[in-house]
Image (tube, rainbow, N blue to C red):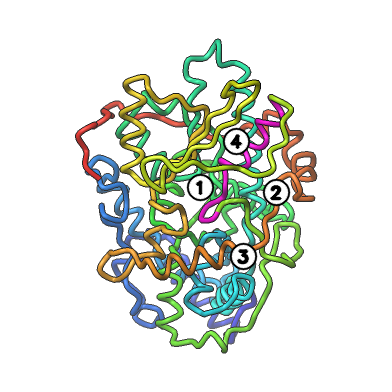
Amino acid sequence: MKCENCTKAECSKKKKQDAADAELSVAQALEDGDEKSEFHRLADARIFLSDCLACGNCVTSEEGAKIFAQNQKAFFKVLSLNKKCDTSLHRLVVASVSPQSVPYFAAKFQLSVCEASKKICGFLKSLGVHHVFDTTIAADFSILETQRDFIQRFRRQTQDEHAFPMFASACPGWVQYAERVLGDLVTPHICTAKSPQQIMGSLVKSYFASQKNLAPDKIFHLAVAPCYDRKMEALREDYYTDLFNCRDVDCVLTSGEVMQIMEQRNISVKEIEEFPLENVFGGTTCQFVRHEGTSSDGYLAHVFRHAAKELFGTEVQEITYKTLKNKDFQEVCLEKDGETVLRFAAAYGFRNIQNMVLKLRKGKFHYHFVEVLACPGGCLNGKGQAQSADGKPERAQLQEMEALFTNVPVQSPENNPHIQELYTSWLEGEESQKSRETLHTKYVPSSHSTARVDMKW
């Protein structure tokens, strides 16, 4: 973050103007624009009901404005300030890339997922990003904490009427819908473990910041994600630090928005220098890996195997999925001595979610754990990357992304060598108060929430 070609006299003249610029709100900056910027031609980020939850109760006008501010211009404003000579305005720019975003670039570039990860890393660094992180470790934490939550619920189920069914918490679209529409019918059943994006935010603004001896507000954290709902998630109140006046994730760009930047700069993928993704320990990721799951992080598979072993001493090798009403609603069961002791399900898309809620209201939804995702087909089908210009799904592209993602090597969270190190050195132990506060969140149902069983998806 060096000062570019300017003399001390010029630097002094610029300080007042730079300070004034810094005091502008993001909304003002977006409204005024920067005509000298090479990026001013980029389209503004917007969020529509069709991109979100298809209900009118979720996004207020104030929230809509904040989501609007999470766009390319906000990102490039920080990069622009880093080029100016007032170092007090400089910030370390860190990007974290979702594993489900990389297959999108692989399909677009006609590369392997590993090659695409190096290209997207190289491209972001060419813009001025200092570090581009692999987020596998954040998903590892999220899965492990979900497993821990499930075991605790299972053991207290006779005392806790809300223990089961337990719903996964990784999808912000689902969580948003549950809080604002379904309310306390559902929120006590949602796992409290943070999503991978927000655990990555904690890693960047807490652990990584301390390693760099930086205050959290001196780091700008960009997340690249497959869906627009991640923008809303980053704005949650519990992901904001009053002391430093900053968020764990400062800006979310969808995969499609990043691709738009590439297209605006008219850069050929062959021109992009390759760099391996980094980790928060200062090293690089030698091999791009994923969790078990053909389109998402595979919470169902990991929690099911762990619960079978921990609770019933059964090692599950092959998981047999039974498709029920459609391919986006599947069931997995564990039987022991002729009795079904674990019953899990995967419910993707709001049609299945609605049916699930209807059965829950009638007391006929008898599952222990449900991996719930708002997008049919899972995270690879996020509307920030798997939609055509007219808003329709690009099915051929989705199939190509699924094929590419399936070929990525699988790594179990328990096999990540850095996990235990962080539990010990950063979180003060797996069961510590700090671990609970850092890796978990809470849900606040809207006071006006009502389960609208007549809603059409």
Q: Residue at position x 76%, y 64% from top?
A: 283
Give the label, 4 or 2, closer to the camera. 2
Question: Mark 4 packing: few (<14 Cα in 10 Å), some, or many (20+)?
Answer: many
Q: Are marks 4 and 3 in contact (CB under 8 Å)?
A: no
Q: Between tags 1 and 4, which lies in front?
A: 4
Return the residue nearer the eye: 160 or 423.
160
Mark 3 closeness class: few <14, some 14–19, many ≥20 residues within 10 Å: few
Q: Indicate left or right for 262 with 339 as reference.
A: left
Three-letter code for the amino acid on which mark 4 is drawn: Thr
Q: Amino acid at mark 2?
A: Ser
Q: Secondary structure at mark 1?
A: loop
Q: Residue 99: percent from the left, percent from the top?
A: 57, 60
Callout 3 secondary element: loop
The segment highlighted magenta reads 294-311
Name the residue carrying label 1: 245
Membership of 301 in magenta stretch = yes
**Kind of element beneath mark 4:** helix
Q: Earlier in the sequence, mark 1 or mark 4?
A: 4
Q: Which residue is mark 2?
A: 412
Q: CA distance from mark 1 to mark 4?
A: 29 Å
Residue 55 locus on image (x, y percent): 24, 43
The label on residue 407 is: 3
Can residue 125 be seen by looking at this rendering?
Answer: no
Disc nearer the start of the sequence (4/3): 4
Q: Earlier in the sequence, mark 1 or mark 2?
A: 1
Q: Nearer the viewer, mark 1 or mark 3?
A: 3
Report the disc number at residue 146. 4
Crowding at label 1, few (<14), some or many (≥20) Cα neighbours within 10 Å? Answer: few
| Label 1–label 3 contact, CB within 8 A | no
